[in-house]
Image: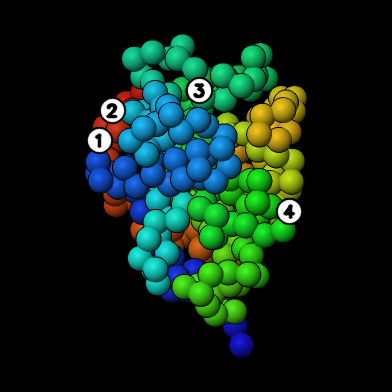
Amino acid sequence: MSYDISQHFFNYFSLCIADTPELQQEVYKIRYQVYCEELQYEPKEEFLNGMEQDIYDSRSIHCLLKHRISDRYIGCVRLVLPDPEQLDDKFPLEEIFQHDFQLGETEFYNYAEISGLAIIGDFRQRQGENTSSVGLLFADNQPEALPSSQERRIYPLTLVSLYLGCTSLLMSFNITNALTVMEAKLSRHLRLCGIPSCLVGDFVNFHGKQAPFLLSPMNIMSSMDSDLSDLFNAIHSELKVKIDDHPLKSKYQPLLLS
């Protein structure tokens, strides 16, 4: 019996662009829950409205992951775009890594950053993974609202789907490279799933040992097997309409195509 990853994933989850103030608030609430309440990465007193935000959100496109059965948003990620009016403005990871990145000859405006990645605890925690904001596999001791073993097979793809969503954004914006901060085990996990990355800096202690990595949409597309490619195509089809109509598209596209 064949196993259609894309079909099964979309039976239980959906991925959308947070292109309204209401949906963006859902992103900030997830980040507050994960970063401030569950993991205590950030102090609650800095976000008294229960929403974790920063200065980079205004030049970001946000993706939201929704669990269909419980009808709740359970994960998010953002693609931080270069500022077309201030190309010297830094990306978030440059606050962590105080050095110049060896990025080759590509112009800096052909880079973006994948950050703000978070999946709520019910969908990420297992023994040994409960200190990570994303987790790698879903727990066996899942809450009663999330029952079946068939559904449980799809949970490791929650993380992968968010990276595929960012890959879709990169391709829609014609951005050739994305920077992100990861632990080594997350990089290995993504590579095994068909999402390779390249280490471009040293590891530092930042919520665990993390380092800057570089991802290329072209490398990701060439590394996918047929199952992951089917899932990506389905995600890209879902997101592309909203991306094409996104107000940041018209703002950034002339720069990115120059």
- Comes first in the chain, label 4 or label 1: 4
| Tag 2–tag 1 contact (CB < 8 Å) | yes
Q: CA distance from mark 4 to mark 2?
A: 43 Å
Amino acid type at mark 3: Phe
Residue plotted at (55% across, 55% down): 121
User: Residue under circle 2?
Assistant: 251
Amino acid type at mark 2: Lys
Q: Indicate which disc residue 128 carries.
A: 4
Placement of the C terminus among the 4 image quadrants: top left
Packing grade of label 2 (10 A; few <14, some 14-19, many >=20) is few
Res 213 visible: no
User: Residue under circle 1?
Assistant: 247
Amino acid type at mark 1: Pro
Placement of the N terminus among the 4 image quadrants: bottom right
Q: Quadrant of residue 183?
A: top right
Q: In this image, 98 relative to 148: left or right? A: right
Viewer-proximal residue, 257 or 121?
121
| Tag 4–tag 3 contact (CB < 8 Å) | no
Q: Is residue 126 above or below residue 134?
A: below
The local secondary structure at tag 4 comes to loop
Q: Position of residue 160 (x, y in %)?
A: 57, 55
Foreground: disc 1 or disc 3: 3
Q: CA distance from mark 2 to mark 1?
A: 7 Å
Foreground: disc 4 or disc 1: 4
- Comes first in the chain, label 3 or label 2: 3
Residue plotted at (65% across, 51% down): 130
- Comes first in the chain, label 4 or label 3: 3
Q: CA distance from mark 4 to mark 3?
A: 30 Å
Q: Is residue 55 above or below residue 185?
A: above
Q: CA distance from mark 3 to mark 2?
A: 18 Å
Viewer-proximal residue, 51 or 156?
51
Packing grade of label 4 (10 A; few <14, some 14-19, many >=20) is few
